[in-house]
Image (tube, rainbow, N blue to C red):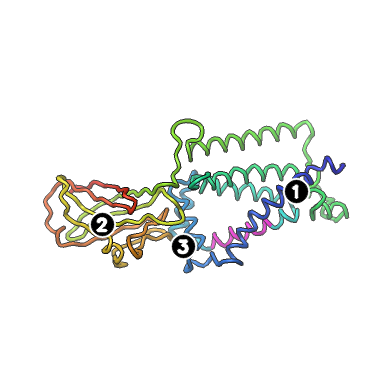
Amino acid sequence: MSIKNDSGLLALAIRLVIGWTYFSAFWRRTILVNKLDPELPGYIGEKFNHFLPNALGIKPIIQYLVENPDILWLNMVIFTIIEGIVGLFIMFGLFTRIMSVGVFFLAMGILLGSGWIGTTCLDEWQIGVLGIATGFVLFLTGSGKYSVDYYSIKNRFKCTQKKWFAWIGSGELPIKESLLPRIVLLGSLFILGLTLMTNQVFHGGLWGTLHNKSVKPKLEITNGNIRGNTLSFDVFRTEGVDVYGSWVISIELMDEQKNVILQYTQAQLASLPKESISNYYVAKVKPGKHSLIVPLGAKAKLYLKSASLSNLPKGKYSIKLTDISGAFWEHQIEI
């Protein structure tokens, strides 16, 4: 094959950039900063927890992992090692085709888990769909002149003489020439369809109202209950920017006439005792310096006590949480 027709060589820039994209994740988490320690700020497991509210298809897997911190940690370590190996091997052009399959599925996980996150340019969605397309292209091309695969083939290493090497390494794909265009077309159309579908589901990018669930915080309040002198309810943050929390500055309980029965102020929420918060996941609702902080994907049951809750008359009541931005959310309960 002439150099000008060496598709693997022509894809060199793609191979180097996509390889570094994945290897850099390993580099950041292990060398530059320790992001694999659950006790340190920036733990990758908390970032993974942020994906939970609006993940597509893999939400039950994410929920299981964030509910089981030890299993989550092990998976984050394995995931990071795989990203490092895949990225490094892709850059060096070693076992390029099997590593490109790794790129494809790593990108698919990013797309389905976090494709809805991105405050300005739909960041995670773009990373996911471009990674899937790149993985497919690199599988078709393999590595060219500047790669370990090419060096191995040129020097006739024993493994390169095996039929399976073309499937996991580089070289001419053992597919009939008449069949290859169909595979390229069908694969490309599938990836385009996946791109359009996720763009619509996550962001309304094809029709209807455009939306971005990473811009404004949204809290869901469920399972409200009053027992004795204690008000309890679940709070779950499902939308908003992933790099900082929703800052709750007021929690109120009101009757049907909007009379305030119970109010926790900003100062009270900032000093809420640990026993008043029972977290479900690794991303934790916790008191901050000036408010109650609710990170993206965090879910907790709150227990608020007051003598004013004892012997309340039967009727309908509403719980109201107010964010520092002025946004608020309500939940109706009945006793």
Could you say which is closer to the camera, residue 94 or residue 64?
94
Q: Quadrant of the rendered structure where residue 187 is?
A: top right
State the separation of the CA atoms marked 2 and 1.
58 Å
Dot 3 alpha-carbon crowd within 10 angstroms: few under 14, some 14 to 19, many 20 or more = some
Q: What amino acid does circle 1 point to?
A: Leu
Dot 1 alpha-carbon crowd within 10 angstroms: few under 14, some 14 to 19, many 20 or more = many
User: Mark 2 highlights which residue?
Assistant: 232
User: Mark 3 highlights which residue?
Assistant: 69
Q: Which is the main secondary structure of the residues drawn in magenta? A: helix
189 shown above or below 81 = above
Name the residue located 33 percent from the left edge and 54 percent from the top edge.
324
Q: Position of residue 5 (x, y in %)?
A: 83, 40
Circle number at residue 12:
1
Question: Which residues are the magenta region?
Answer: 74-87
Secondary structure beneath disc 2? Answer: strand
Secondary structure beneath disc 3? Answer: helix
| Sequence-earlier tag: 1 or 3 | 1
Dot 2 alpha-carbon crowd within 10 angstroms: few under 14, some 14 to 19, many 20 or more = some
Q: What amino acid does circle 2 point to?
A: Ser
Q: Position of residue 264 (x, y in %)?
A: 24, 59
| Sequence-earlier tag: 3 or 2 | 3
Q: What amino acid does circle 3 point to?
A: Pro
